Image: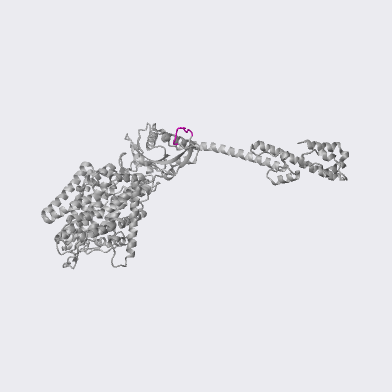
Amino acid sequence: MLLPILLIISALVGHGQAMNGAAAAVLNPTCSLKDNCNLGDNLLATPENAEASNDKLESQIASIFEDKVNYSLKLFADDATATQTATTTTTTTVLELSGNLSDHHHHQLISDGNFTISHLKSNETERKEQQDQEQEEDQIENDERVYLYNIGKRFLAISQPFDASRNPDASTQCRSQMRQYLDALDNFDLWALKMHDASGKLNSGILNGNINQPGDFDQCMGIRQKVRQQHRRPYDHHNNDSGDTIIRGQYCLAYAQPVLPHKSKRLQTFFKLLQSHGPFKSEFNDPGHRVPRYSLINWGICVPAGCTARDVEYSVAEYLNNQTAFTGISFNVRVEPQMCQSKDQEPWDRNTTWAVRFFVLILSVAILSTIYDRCTKAQSQQNAWCTVFSLDKNLRWLFSTSSSPGDIEAVHGIRFLNALMLIFSHKSMAMFFNPYNNRTAMSESLGQPWTVIGRAASLYTDPFLLFSGMLTSYSLFGRLMKQQPIRLKNEYISRLMRIVPPLAALILFCTYVLPLWGSGPQWNLVVGHHADICKKHWWRNLLFIHNYFGFSEMCLTHTHHLGIDTELFAVAPIFILGLWRWPRRGLFALLLLCTVGTAARYYTTIVNQLSNYIYFGTNIQRLFRTADYMYSFPPHRSTVYIMGILLGYALRKFQGIKLSSGQLRLGWLGATICLLASVLGPAPMGDINYVYNSTHAAIYAAFAPIAWCLFFSWIVFVSHNGYKNKFTQIFSWRGFQVSTKLSYAIYLTQFPVFFYNVGRRRHIHHYYNFVSIILDTNEFISIFLASVALTVLFDAPFQNIKKLLIKRPAPATSSSSSSSSSSAKAAATPTTTTSNGIGKAAAEVPATTLATASHPHAD
C-alpha cells in the first residue's frame, strides 16, 4: 500500500528537472487510481502540448496524495473491522471496487463506513469514552454489591430471616425454595426483601399490649417470582424445560402461648401487661372461631408456598426455644393448616357453583315478579302467585307502620331495645379479635363496672323468649275463649315456613359464597372455619337440634337460640291447654317448673363453675361450658318462656282490669327495682381486679333473667290495658314495627357481618374509646342492607306463600272459623270504658303479629 507514496517521493527528489513534463502527465493521466496503477506511469508520461505552472502541479500532486492516503486508511479500517466483529460480511478489497476513486470516495462519505482521518479520531475518542463508561459502570456495580452485601448483613443481623426448612421432615420443595429465598435475600433481590419484610416483627409498645404482629398480608400474598433452579435433577418431571420454578408467597398465622413455670413477681407483672391484663383468659387448645383466644400471641410469617404449616410450626418453636433457653420461659406453638394461605386460582367446586346459581335464580325471580307487579298494577285482579317475590310488594309491607287493632304495641319497642343492646354486646365480643397497638390501655378502659351494658349479652336474649311464649299463649287463649279450633299442624307448618327459608339461605350463603368474598390474616379462622363446620353439620340447624351438640361444633353458633325457641314452641300448646283446662293446677305446675328451672340454673352454675355473665378475666373454657350446659339447654331457659305464657294468659284474663294509682306506683317501683337489680347487680363483676366467685355467678344466672323480664312484663301489661305514660309511649312508637319485621333478619346477619370485617382486618389499629369502636356506621349500614335483602328475598315471599297455602276463612261465628294463621284481620271485641275514661280493647292478636313475634330474635 505504501508503494505509490514512495514513487511520488522519489519522483519529487530524483526528477526535479522533468517537473514541467510531469505536470502535463498529471493533467492527462493514462491510468486511474481505481486501477491502483503506478503513479510513475502518469508522471513520466509526456502529454501533447502540456504546459502547466508549478503551483498547479503541486496542487494536483497533493490531491493525488490525499486520495491515496484516504483510500489506504479505508482499506486498513475495513480489515480491522472484519477482524474484530467476526461477522459474515466480507471486507471490500481493492479488486472489488468499481468506478473511479473519486466516485467511490463520494459514496463512502454518504455511507456509514466512510473513514477519514477526522472520522477515525472521532471513533477512537468515542470508543475510549465508551470503555471508560463501561469501566465506571462496572466499578459502580461492584461497589453496589459490596454496599448491599454489608447492608444486608447488618440488616439481617438485626432482623433475622425466618427459615421454614429447619424441620427434619421438611419436603424437598420446601428446602429448595427456602435456599433460593435465602440466596436471593443475601443478593438483596427485591422479591426476597418483600417476603422478609412481610413477616411480623417486634415493635414498640409491647408492654402496652402491642404484641400481636400480623405483618403485611397483601405484600406476602402478592409475591410471585420465577427463579432458575440451581440444582435441577434431570429426572424431575415437575420442572419445566428451562429449569425455572415459580416461588409464591404464603402467609401463615402462628399462635404462640408463653408459659411461665416459676413464680417471679416481676415476670408475672411483665406478662400481665404483655397479655393486657387478660380480659379473656384462653388456653392453647381452646376453639378460637367463636370467642377470641386473647392470651395467645398472633404472629404473621411469610414463607415460600412450598413449605407446609408443619414446617413453619417446627421452625417457630425451635426459634422461640433457642431464644428463651435457660430462662425458664417456654412457648407452645401452633400453626394450623387452614391458617396458611397463598394466592391460588382454584376453580369453584360443584356445590359453590350451585349455590351461586340458586341466589342468581332467586334474584331473577324477584326481578321478574316485580316487573309483573308493576305491569299489572292497574288491573283489577293480579295473580297472587306471580307477585309473592315482588320487591315492590315486599318493601311496601316491610316499611309499613300500620298496626292491627289487637296489636300489643309496646312489644315492638322493647324488642328493638334488646336487639340493639344485643348488637352492641356481640360487637364488643368481635372487637377483641382485632389487633390493637394499645391493647393494655383498652383493657384498662373496659375493666370498669359500666361495661355491664356489653357483658350482659345473655340477659338481652331472655325478653325474646318471654314474648315468644306470651304471643303464642295470647293467640291460643283468644281462640279458646271464642271456642275456635286449635289446628296445631297449621301452627307448626306456619312457623317452619316462617323461619326455615331465611335460615337455610343464610347457611348456604355463609358456607359456599361468603368464603369467596374476601381474605385476610384471620379470614380462615372466623369465616372459613365456620363454613367447614356448616358443610358437616348444616342438617342439625334445619332440624333445630344443633343446640344439643355444643358450641365448638355448631354451624353458625349465634343461631343456637332458634333451636331453644323452636323446642319450647313445640311443647307450649301442652302448657297452654293444661292451664286452660285446669287453671289452678296448671298455674301451680307452671310455677313449679319455673322454680325448678331457676334452681337448676343455680345448682349447675355452682357445680360446674359456670358464668352466664362475661366478667373481666373470663375463662374461655368456662364460657363454652356455660353455653353447653346451661345457655343452650332448653330446660334451663324455660323459666322466662313460661313467664311469657303466664303473661299472655294474664293479658286475656285480666283484660280491662282497673288499677288504682297506688297499685300503679307499687308496680312501677317493683319493676324499677327489678331493672336495677338485673343491671347494677352484676356490674362489679366487670372490674379489672374481679376474681371469679361461683356464688355471684349462680345468683346472676338464676335471678337476673327473671328480674329483667319482670320489668318488661309490667310495661307490656299496663300499656296494653291503657295505662300509658311517656315511657310506655316511647316503646309503643309505630316506627318500631319496621324493626320488628327486620328483627329476625338482623338476628341472622349481624354475626356474619362482624366476622367478615374481622377476617378482612389487615393491620393493627389504635383504640380510642368504646363508643368509636361500637358505633361503626359502616357495619350498621351493612347489617341493615343485608337484613332488608334477606327479608324481601326470603322472609316476606315465603310468608306470602304460606298465606296462599293455608287459606284464611272469613271471621268466624262458629268454632271452626279460624286458626292462628287465619286471624290476621280478626275483629276487635267491644271496647269497655272504666270510670276514669281509659279505653281497653280486647282483640284477637293478628296472625302476622304472632308469626313475627313467635320466632326468636335473640343472640
Would residue 784 be found to the left or right of residue 66 on screen?
left
User: In the image, is residue 418 part of the stretch drawn in magenta?
Assistant: no
Question: 396 above or below 194?
Answer: below
- Viewport quadrant of the N terminus: top right
Q: Position of residue 254 (x, y in %)?
A: 37, 39
Question: Is any atom of residue 231 visible in this view?
Answer: yes
- Counting every numbered tag in the picture gives 0
User: Residue at horizontal 24%, vertical 60%?
Assistant: 804
Q: Is residue 480 above or below residue 43?
A: below
* In the foreground, 18 or 461: 18
Q: How is the image coloured?
A: one colour
Q: Which quarter of the picture shows residue 278?
A: top left
> For this rendering, which residue is in front, 503 or 303?
503
Residue 257 location, x and y as percent? Answer: 34, 38
- The percent position of residue 124, horizontal first and vertical second, equals 68, 40
- Report which quarter residue 199 is drawn in: top left
Q: Say whether residue 193 is visible.
A: no
Q: Which residues are magenta?
A: 230-238
Main SS category, magenta section = loop
- Residue 667: x and y in percent read 19, 58
Relative side of 213 to 814, left or right:
right
Front-lying residue, 678 or 105? 105
Toward which corner of the image does residue 70 lie, by quadrant?
top right
